[in-house]
Image (cartoon, coloured by chain):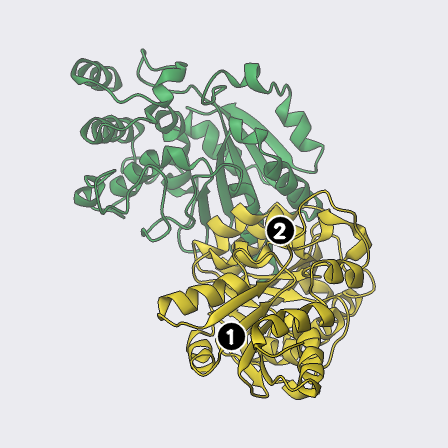
Chain colours: A green, B yellow
Amino acid sequence: MMAGTTTAQVLSSVRVRRLIIEQSKRAHVGHIGSALSIADILVALFSGTVDPKVDVFILSKGHAALAQYCVLAELGLMTHQTLDTYCGDDTQLGVHPDHTLTGITFSTGSLGHGPSLGAGVALAKRIAGKLGRVFVLMSDAELNEGSVWEAVMFAGHHKLDNLTVILDNNGQQALAPTAEVINLSAIDELIARFGWECRRVDGHNVDALTAAFDARAPGRPLFVIADTVAGKGVSFMERQVKWHYLPVDDAQFAQALGEIG
Amino acid sequence: MRKQFVSTLIDIADHDDRVVLLTADLGFMVLEPFAEHHPDRFFNVGVAEANMMSLAAGMAHEGLIPFCYSIATFASMRGYEQFRNGAVLHQLPVRIVGIGGGFAYGTAGPTHHALEDIALMRVQPGVGIVAPADDGQVDRALRDHYARPQPMYLRLAKETASHPELAGRFRWGRLEVIGDGDIAIVAIGSMTGVALEARRRLHAEGIQTAVAVAASIAPAPTEDLVALLSSKNACITIEDHRPVGGLGSLVAETIADHGMGVRLVRCGVTDPTGETTGSEVFLRRRNGLDVDGLMAAVRRVALVPA
């Protein structure tokens, strides 16, 4: 199935972005920029690419979990009542995702764990002869973590072609632009040298993302570099480090929803 | 114990295809038989312990039972956060196999001395900790408990060991008590030989001791400890580990939690960092963890002239 065609009506980037802004406003919690950055990637993944019956999705950049919660709610896998508990007391919906929640496979929050977890699931599926792909969504800042490279080497060596890692390449990390912290040029060439198939796409173009997720090569894990904009869709948040942290006030809330549409 | 571990694991893997063995590039002349018997379930992940711990969590999530093999220091510490956020948080059946607790790697030096591994594992909820005394306990513990649902840490000595007094007994959450007397010696698995020899010699001096082998560190053998210590004048713990967080702490906590008045002496590794290194025999002696050291500790509490 060409993902993104049949269920695209169900999952809309605009709806997901609106929910992100509404929930962060209600809960008075930040990490909005990261959530907006991955909204289109999640819409592409969960509009037909990911088969929840056999596939596993891991949000390695756990701090963007609000986006995943909103997608789960839009897909009807979580009630909007539950979504409204986001960052409240006694909630399963913290800033970072918890595996006790339906639709979340692994609890994450500490960076650099997702690729290794994903490689383990992928290897186990191969050993057991099981169907299904493993998708890991990670941030570009996670490339700073040594464990990511341990996983990149391992998955390439073991030719885990049932593993797909998607890099949310928004060029921004907690304190500064990634290029100013640890500058990695030509990430695609770098990863390809470890035996991966690499694709680089506009991370806000759902059709281009969907096509990239289908670009699997036998014997090579797939690495999709999704070029994104932190805070995408809200002009005053885009490419601003502070929106990694800040919640919105009333005026910003109104403006953000107006721009998202 | 390493060889017993591999031999038993091969046997288990023959009957249970969920069992896989990962190593972070260690186990020369030890792991080869498993790799030959089960080449499709043996993975040298490279010198990458952090990756190994998360790989194992991913594999366990898919229904496998992964054993992660390395020297105890690297196995317990290098991927600790991955173990915590993976196997522990999700309560998955990942098994860390730490080889050479204490000073087993002797002249390899302090980077290879596992003196805090038990403490690190004890603070993680729901982790089973097994520190067998001999090959028989390795075999029994593995066969009876390899498939338990929670994560597990196995602390195995390098060399083969056999204590006929144990007759291969191992029970989850229990002590194995050998002999009786006014004083209890509670030994972590690897110190069992020292404890039994001290018991024999003290007997000749007229000091009667009971040796309790604590091979099941978690779950803690709480009921057995309370029962044992309720009839004792004093208790000596001995472990090739720092006394903070290890067996000495476990027994102290048990005594405090149950309002017991028994006198406790904790023998463990007290060397500061920066000391010279040497053989396991030398390093144990320097820390009072040999037969003479243990006998001296017992005599001090025995109220019997030495």
- B222 or B137, nearer to the observer: B222
Chain containing mark 2: B
Q: Which kind of residue does numbered mark 2 sit on?
A: Met
In the structure shown, which secondary structural element does the residue marked by tag 1 occupy? strand
Q: Residues within 10 Å of mark 2 (few under 14, many from 20)?
A: many
Q: Write down the residue under mark 2.
A: B52
The residue at the far front in this view is B305
At 52% from the left edge and 60% from the top edge, which residue is drawn?
A: B60
The residue at the far top in this view is A236
State whether residue B2 is above or below residue A198.
below
Q: Residues within 10 Å of mark 1 (few under 14, many from 20)?
A: many
- A165 or B66, nearer to the observer: B66
Numbered disc total = 2
The quarter of the picture where the C terminus of chain B appears is: bottom right
Residue A222, labelled with which disc?
none
Q: Which kind of residue does numbered mark 1 sit on?
A: Ala
State whether residue B267 is above or below residue A176.
below
Q: Write down the residue under mark 1.
A: B234
The location of residue B273, given as percent across then percent down, is 68, 44
Dot 2 or dot 1: first in sequence order is 2
Q: Is residue B134 visible?
A: no
B9 sits to left or right of A246: right
Q: Quadrant of residue B5?
A: bottom right
At 52% from the left edge and 57% from the top edge, which residue is drawn?
A: B245
Q: Is residue A110 visible?
A: yes
The quarter of the picture where the N terminus of chain B appears is: bottom right
The location of residue A228, given as percent across then percent down, is 45, 22
